[in-house]
Amino acid sequence: SMDTDSLSHWQKLGKFRNRHIAVGGGSQSDLGNNTYGRVYNKNGITDKVVIAISQSGSAEVNVSGIFADGTSVKNYYDGSTGTVSGGKVTFSAGTNGVILIEEN
């Protein structure tokens, strides 16, 4: 059986996917360093996320072209928030190395 950390990890990814049509239905852009922007923009619905994988420690994530400077964003994975500056935002990667960024 899966341990609780692993189960929690997959539940978080599933919930994030359910919250964001961009995850399954958006167009993807490679932002480098195992970071991907996904944008869905159809029928008056706009949804944007940035997903970073294989990160470690305090990770500076490139969100350039997805979230503008000054935008308040949240790492859905751990609930922490940050503000985009110079096209980047810094979040703690945690044990799984996954950072799920949405507009706050």
Image (cartoon, helix red, strand yellow):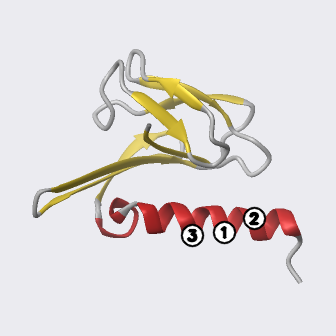
Residue at 66% x, 41% y is 55
Image spot of residue 63 (x, y percent) = 40, 33
Image spot of residue 96 (x, y percent) = 74, 52
- Amino acid type, callout 1: Gln
Asked if labels 3 and 1 touch by Cβ distance under 8 angstroms, the answer is yes
- Mark 1, secondary structure of its residue: helix
Q: Is residue 68 above or below residue 33?
A: above
Residue nearest the viewer, comparing 15 with 92: 15
Q: Is residue 49 left or right of residue 92?
A: left
Q: Is residue 65 above or below residue 36?
A: above
Residue nearest the viewer, comparing 80 with 25: 80
Residue designated by label 3: 14
Q: How would you rate the neighbour count of disc 1 (Cα within 10 Å): few for under 14, some for 14-19, many for 20 or more?
A: few
Q: Earlier in the sequence, mark 2 or mark 3?
A: 2
How far apart marks 2 and 1 lie (CA) works out to 5 Å
Q: Is residue 87 left or right of residue 94?
A: left
Asked if labels 3 and 2 touch by Cβ distance under 8 angstroms, the answer is no
Residue designated by label 2: 8
- Mark 3, secondary structure of its residue: helix
Indicate which disc residue 11 carries: 1
Residue at 29% x, 62% y is 26
Q: Within the image, what quadrant is residue 75 found in?
A: top right
Q: Quadrant of the N terminus?
A: bottom right
Q: Is residue 102 left or right of residue 44?
A: right
Residue nearest the viewer, comparing 66 with 19: 19
